Amino acid sequence: MGDPLTPDASRLTSMKIWDSLPKKQYLSLAPWAWVQLESANPPGPFPFVAGVAPEVVASLHEAHTLLSSTIDTAISDVFSKRAPLDDPDRQRRLEDAYAEVVSARPYLQQHIRCGRKPDGTFRWEFPTDPAKSAAVTNGGLRIFHAVKRQAIPIGFDRRQLGPLVGRILGFLDGTHQTDEIKTVVTTSGRDGERVLTQLIESLHQHACLVSSNTSSVRSRWFETVHDMDTVHLGHAALLYRQRDHALLFDPWLLPWFAESSVPSLWGSLLPKPAAVFLTHDHDDHVDPRTLLHLPKDTPIIVPSRRNRRTLSYDYLSLLRELGFGHVIELAHGDCWAFEGGAVYSVPFYGEDPCDVEMPRNCYLIADRGYNVLVHADSGPTNRGKSALTDGVILSLVQKHGPIPLVFASQQQLLEIRGHAAHAPLSPPGKWLDVGENGYLTNAYLADVCTAAQAKLFVSYATGGAEWYPDHLSFMFSRRNPARTALLTAHWERPETLKGLLATQGCGYHYGHALDLFRRTADGKVEPLMTGDSLTPLSLYRLDHGDPPFMKSSYGTTPSRDIDKDRL
Ligand SMILES: [Fe+2]
């Protein structure tokens, strides 16, 4: 068992960082510390959107921004009942107002061609280019220490060092000893060695590193989680154990006290993943901070550009910048094989209020005759197309057999398209129409489970852990029931879905972090509580004992936001 490292200032000034760190000990980033890369230039409106040049996106975004108060006024007119809900002239007025904005600005006309044609139809076009993307390059980083509330910046001096930083952070997961980390730093080239040495020095100086002579996290996980078990890690994050491998889906982990007062699951508290699967381009499914801290030899499986219509999300640029070298684009129907089975890419529908149709994946784990569907936020599109109408679920069952365990979001979101994230990339005449933004009705979800021949439906991807932030409208927490009541007042009740599922022999479970799902001998799936064995604090204590801010000898008073009674 080791202790938080106490920096020795005199040795640090002589740059002998490696002599200051304990030899033959496992080194890791303390779970209340993290690193964030910072963009060299202000990122544009849609970082990592590909298929259109960033300057074209900037013009589209500006045209939308110039009309946004007009749109809000038009919405107020409907709310105040001055305007009817269905106004047949609304689309034409919107289009004409948009054309007026563009025609008054030559710099917008460079990128946007729009106007009323002689036949009365509206023309709206912008140039697309599959080779273009709004990739982001980072110019520095900031180290955060949540207990001390410190943020320490380090610049890259105009060098592209994001991938090297991601690589070294991936090594600080408590499974590598000091000498191994030293070798990585000293073999990363002259510029790399300088910045990485500075990073390790700063982490040490600001008490962001912990060490231990044991590395027990993986064995604790695998004592609790058996082969073919699935564990919910909060929100849309899942861990599936495939023999002695951990497969992660949509990991959104948080450093301790980053967003809440409770210790959370964070990179060094999980077993090293054998692969990470990402479903779609939403921040709660692709979290750069989580990914930056994961080991960089991990294969990352993402939706494929082969499934794009025009636009896509540039996973490759993002993941390369974070330091990953092994990114696999998995097109619908293709699979990532493992011994005894594979994970299949399954088409993801909807959660697309403006019909942008970026490629997205659901996943089917097909493992030695046992199947698990990671359905995420997929649901019917604005036109009613879905995995059901296209026979996707049915064909999965025909090919792989029944799918006893289904993970799906139960969100029921509708959105005025002009307020949706990708509105500037969609036809302006529809901005006052309503689009689905993940509208998963009870009937739809019950039908998915019927087609899958499911035995257990797990509702997830709407929170499910106390460590997530409160401000997102699709996240619910037990902390604020009145807010949940306001947001879901007009949603169908979960109890009704539970009843619908019961009639077809399928259970209903609302997923909380660290719930475990295990198949039973009779072909069903049983939800189990993992108790204290996998809680963030008990995982930390395995190798490090009590965190320093729980010891009276520690020189820093924990923030008042940290509720020690809950630790
Ligand atoms: Fe989503």
Image (cartoon, helix red, strand yellow):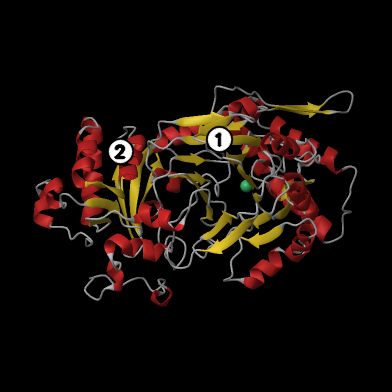
Q: Secondary structure at mark 2?
A: loop
Label 2, residues with CA under 10 Å away: few <14, some 14-19, many ≥20:
some
| Quadrant occupied by the N terminus | bottom left
Q: Give the answer, above or below, for where 218 lies relative to 53.
A: below
Q: Inspect this view and state whether residue 380 appears.
A: yes
Direction from residue 168 to residue 333 in the image, left or right = right
- Give, as a three-letter code, the residue at label 1: Ala
* Quarter assignment of residue 512: bottom right
Disc nearer the start of the sequence (2/1)? 2
Query: At 59% across and 22% down in the image, what residue appears?
Result: 130
Nearer to me, 456 or 428: 456
Q: Which numbered tag is attached to residue 156?
A: 2
Nearer to me, 525 or 159: 525
Q: Which residue corresponds to mark 1?
A: 342
Residue at the farthest front position: 521
Kindly report the distance in space between the C-alpha atoms of the residues bearing marks 2 and 1. Answer: 41 Å
Nearer to me, 395 or 444: 395
